[in-house]
Structure formats: structure tokens, C-alpha cells
Image: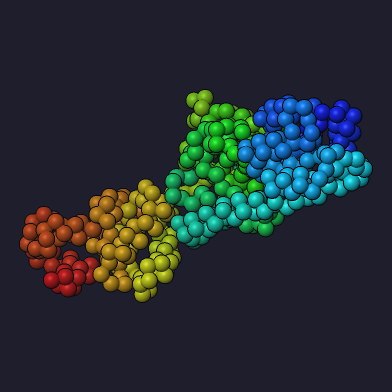
Amino acid sequence: MFNILVIEDNDTMREGMVQILQKMNVRVSEACSGQEGLQTFATDSFDLIITDYRMDDIDGLQVLEHIKAHSPQTEVMIITAYGSIDLAVQAMKQGAADFITKPFSHDEFRLRVEKILQRLEQEEKIVRLTEENVYLREEIEGQFNFGEIIGESPRMQELYRTITKVAKTDSSVIIYGESGTGKELVARAIHKASSRAENPFIRVNCGALAEGVLESELFGHEKGAFTGALRRKKGRFELADTGTIFLDEIGDLPPATQVKLLRVLQEREFERVGGEETITVDVRVIAATNRDLKKLVDSGTFREDLYYRLHIIPIYLPPLRQRREDIPILAKHFLTQLSKKIGRPELTISQEAMDALCTYTWPGNVRELENVLERSAVLADGPEIRSEDLPLTVHENADFTDMGDNFDLNEILARVEKEAIQRAMKRAGGIKAEAARLLGLKTSALYYKLEKYGLLDQQNNSR
């Protein structure tokens, strides 16, 4: 709804214009002098100011100059009984949107105002599209972090079934998962499979913004709401109207913002920071966190009523160490993407390196796997990533006791033995006698095991 201020020292004229405007479904404020008008302007944000030219204290051109100096986007229409070509030209040069001479009919006044408001509406659409494009460009540029949801393990198959069911509803969703498990990818998948797919998907990282900035980002602000607020700004809830808003790291939401978010979830309405107009939106809320919200509720740092509003449909993402069978599939996908990114021939990975990847605990989950592969691909001498190209942490912190769903004892023991031999050979600088000593083996036994695991040729080739 547009907000209009009428400044006119003639009571009858001012009341007549206010009555016409009130029938146009806009908010109207009035002032009986130029000074009062500027005081009113300083306390609110206006889209259009209609001011008389000849007033006792401050004339219309002075009002126009002040408005444009403090709020260039606010339109000004000047009304006067002393019309002249020179005055019209001067007003237009100073930025007036229109100039109308008394006396005028109700219809002429209404049409002039409607024309200005139509232009403002078009400009507002352009601003919204520009802001949406900024968000979308940022999101598109960041999509390579995970590519798309990938995995064939039973846990992932269950996740796919859940996404399909959840996408058919408009219920709030809360996604739980460690950092790097792909919570945003799941939120996007739900949105793309829903009836809102063609509408905006807007992301907010609640943990990355200070409390005051976060509130403005979520709900927008009016001009003058705080230092630096030079114009009205729409928040991300407005930008997400008819679509989906993804609130990442919801567990870091400050208490005051939790109250306002609860109202949006309950009533689907809010006010911009520093504003009075109530804005209604149709938005699906998907939240995510790597924290235990129930524990936060018990500790008093997260509102219980907000928790239950968000916890309608919980989704739990498994960490990578609990779906190790997906690591080869993910690695192949990332290597294909990396080949294009760094301009290298099709990248491959040796079985030894793959074994190391499959036995590492991956505290950083899928994101860490991607980063490790990119680092290794850049440092590798050829198109094949070998074990020595991987970071030492992948070898040294491999967890051979956690083999996922694999209970084949022979295979587990073989992997442990192979890894121990590789580490001993690396520690011994490739000297087999020293490696055998570290392992408590005879040198002949070490030769046998090197050959058994295909490591003997590798040692010879490394000379």
C-alpha cells in the first residue's frame, strides 16, 4: 500500500484532496504547513508527497529540495494557484514528478496521482526483480559446493522417499544434520518438487548475521529506521512471497527475532523494521540446524512454541561416515566436475586412494570430501589421484573400526593390514627392511604382503 503525505495550508483544499486519496486505497497523512510537513516526513517513509507551492513558512520548492536531498526515491507533486511556465520548469529540474495548477477537478487530480503511483509500482517491481536476481545469482554461484543430492545407500533412498512426500504439502520442515551433510540441497529439492517450484527460493543464514542486520534482512526496513537506511528495503520474507524461504542455522536465531518469526509462522504477517504497515505473505518455511533444538529449548535459549511450529516435519540427514557406500559415487561425481573446473583431462582415483577415502571418518562430511578431492586433483602429477596425493589427515585419521554396514571380517582386517603397511613404508622412506622392523615382520614376509596388496609395483615405480 502506497503512503502519501498532503501538505496544504488551505483546510478546505487539503481535506478535499485527502478524501479523494482515501478512496484510492492508499495511506494518507496531512500537514497544514511546510514546516509541519517536513516534520511528518522525518518520522515516516512516504512514496509521494503532494505539496502546495505558496505557503507562509516554507514554499513548495523548498519542500521539494529537502525531500529530494533526504529521500531521492520519494516523488513530489506541486500544486499552486500561481502557475507559470518558469515555475513548472524550475520544479521539474529540481525533480518534481508533476505540476498541477489550481483550480482542478477531482478527476484530474485523481488521474495525475494514479499516473505517478503506476510509475512507482513499475519501479518497485524492477527493484524487487533486481534484488531477487542478486539473491538468485549468489545462490547459483554457490551451488557447486555439492552439485546435487547423490547417493544410493538405504539411508539416502529413505531420504528421497521423504522428500517426495514432504514436497506435496506446505507444512514447515526442519532439517537436522551435521555441517556439510547437504541441508540446503534437501531444502532446494523439496522446493523444486513442490507446487511452488516456479516461485522464489530465498536463503538466509541466521548464524552469519548480527541481530540488528538479521531482522532487517528477514523483514525489511523503512527509510530512516536506523543509521544508513536511506530507502525502504524489502526483506527476504517479502522476496520469498508465494515461494519458499530457507532459514539455515535456525538454532542461532536471537531471542527477539524468534518472537517475530513465531508470529510470521502463525499469522503469515509482519511489519518492516521502523514501519507500521502490516505485510502479509504466502511463504513456506524450511529451517535447518546442526544443533539439537530440543536441548536449546531445555536450556531456555530457544522458544518452545517456535520449536513446535518448526518441528512439524523433521528430517534427519545421515553423516557421510554412516553411508560410506556412497563415497565412491560422490567421488566420481566430484572428479567429473573438477575436471571441467580446473581444465584437466578426466580425473580418476586409484583403488588405494579410494580405500583411504572410504575409511576416513569425514568430520566435515560431503563438503570436506569435495574439498579434499579438489586439493588432491590440483596437486596430483597426472590425471589419477593416488594415495600420496591425499592429505595426511585422511590417512592418519582413518577409522578402520567403523566400516558402515560391512561386517566381512576378512575384508576389514585386510584393509587395516594394507593401511598399516602403507604407513610403515612411508615412515621408513620406502626402505623395506626398516618398514618390516616397524611392523614386527621379517623382510621376506613384508615382500609377500606388498605383492599381495599390489604395493610392490607401486614401490618399484616410485623409485
* Near-viewer residue (392 or 35): 35
**Taking 454 as reference, is 253 left or right?**
right
**Taking 135 as reference, is 401 left or right?**
left
Residue 425, horizontal then vertical, whole percent: 15, 60
Quick check: can you spot residue 118? yes
Q: Quadrant of the C terminus?
A: bottom left
Residue drawn at point x = 37 percent, y = 56 percent: 371
* Near-viewer residue (2 or 445): 2
**Taking 112 as reference, is 192 left or right?**
left
> Which quadrant of the structure image shows residue 63?
top right
* Near-viewer residue (299 or 129): 129
Residue 1, horizontal then vertical, whole percent: 76, 40
Residue drawn at point x = 17 percent, y = 67 percent: 450
Residue 436, horizontal then vertical, whole percent: 10, 59
Residue drawn at point x = 79 percent, y = 48 percent: 85
Q: Is residue 200 above or below residue 206?
A: below
Q: Is residue 428 above or below residue 116?
A: below
Quick check: can you spot residue 170? no
Count of number-bearing discs: 0
Residue 148, horizontal then vertical, whole percent: 51, 60
